[in-house]
Amino acid sequence: MHLSYLVRLLTYMLYLTFFLVTVSCVSVSHQNMPEEDTAELDLLKKKCTLCHGLPHPKRHTQEEWGYLLTLMEKRMNEKNISYTTEEMIQIKSYLQRNAR
Ligand code: HEC
């Protein structure tokens, strides 16, 4: 077996590894969210990814979301991140109707 052939094989395997790693990372960050392409989900993506990853509605129950959103408003106030009452109502409604 030629050395150049071996090098090419190894390069190919390296590319394949990179490819697989990339694909698996993308699929993790792109989780399936309910109600794709709605204004409410857009709002969640815009307002709720500034400090951490996109939270999936199934992570919590309706009651938990009520409590958590109050907590998040506090966190946003601390960081001077602006939001309107209307926006929070829409986000809360989306999370609660798709809750666990
Ligand atoms: C200003 C930064 C900030 C923003 C903006 C923010 N969060 Fe958070 N979030 C935090 C911090 C910090 C924590 C860790 C818990 C804590 O200290 O309150 C957290 C924790 C959470 C958790 C943790 C519980 C879990 O399931 O792991 C959820 C859910 C969550 N946030 C949802 C939201 C939602 C929904 C929004 C949008 C309305 C939002 N966050 C916007 C800072 C933020």
Image (spheres, helix red, strand yellow):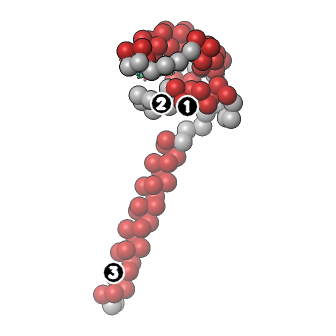
**CA separation, marks 2 and 3?**
43 Å
Tell me which numbered mark, 3 or 1, is placed earlier along the sequence. Answer: 3
**As drawn, is 87 to the left or to the right of 69?**
right
Q: Which residue is mark 1?
A: 45
Q: Which residue is mark 3?
A: 7
Q: Is 38 above or below relative to 24?
A: above
**CA separation, marks 1 and 2?**
6 Å
Q: Residues within 10 Å of mark 3 (few under 14, many from 20)?
A: few
Q: Nearer the viewer, residue 57 or 44?
A: 44
Name which residue type carries label 2.
Thr
Q: Position of residue 80 (x, y in %)?
A: 41, 18
Element on which disc 3 rests: helix
Q: Which residue is mark 2?
A: 49
Q: Are marks 1 and 2 in contact (CB under 8 Å)?
A: yes
Q: Position of residue 63 (x, y in %)?
A: 54, 9
Q: Position of residue 83 (x, y in %)?
A: 53, 18
Q: Residue at x 45, y 48 (%)?
A: 25
Q: Position of residue 49 (x, y in %)?
A: 47, 30
Say whether mark 2 is within 8 Å of ligand 1.
yes
Name which residue type carries label 1.
Lys
User: What quarter of the picture does the C terminus occupy?
Assistant: top right
